[in-house]
Image (tube, rainbow, N blue to C red):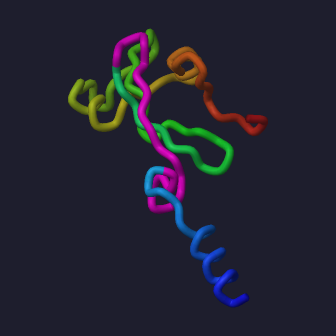
Amino acid sequence: MLGIIASTVLFISCKKDEEKGTPTGNPTGEFTDSRDSQVYKWVKIGEQTWMAENLNYETLDSWWYDDSPSNGKIYGRLYTWDAAVDACPSGWHLPTDEA
């Protein structure tokens, strides 16, 4: 009986590394923005999927910190609220209290 319990515990606690995701257990990945081919990382936390880095998509009301394109590669772009809404890639949205 003890052998059955021990083998069951070992079987249940073993998972493939690919299924574990990050050390915190969160799956991660990348997607390519079809508008400008920039690649962004994402992470799933609980039931929500978040971008794991700042967006760097150019819109009418966006700019780089200190007006330096090199800062865009590091920090992404700065946006007005309306520009940020427009900058979200298809299938993504700004977080709100509702979603």
Q: How many marks?
A: 0
View extreme (bottom): residue: 2
Residue 40 occupies quadrant: top left
Measuring from the top left, give residue 33's x and y in whole percent.
42, 19
- Does residue 54 appear left or right of residue 27 in this picture? left
Q: Is residue 1 above or below residue 32?
A: below
**x 75%, y 39%: residue:** 97
Rendered-image quadrant of the C terminus: top right
Q: Nearer the viewer, residue 24 or 7?
A: 7
Q: Nearer the viewer, residue 79 or 30?
A: 30
Q: Is residue 91 magenta?
A: no
Q: Main secondary structure of the magenta part?
A: loop
- Does residue 69 appear left or right of residue 52 in this picture? left
**x 65%, y 42%: residue:** 48
Q: Nearer the viewer, residue 84 or 18?
A: 18
Q: Is residue 37 above or below residue 8?
A: above
Rendered-image quadrant of the N terminus: bottom right
- Does residue 38 appear left or right of residue 42 in this picture? left
Q: Is residue 30 magenta?
A: yes
Measuring from the top left, give residue 45's x and y in whole percent.
60, 49
Q: State the extent of the magenta-drawn residues as a range.
A: 19-37
**x 59%, y 25%: residue:** 92
Measuring from the top left, give residue 63's x and y in whole percent.
36, 21
View extreme (right): residue: 98
Measuring from the top left, give residue 46's x and y in whole percent.
65, 50
Residue 11 occupies quadrant: bottom right
Q: Is residue 91 above or below residue 75?
A: above
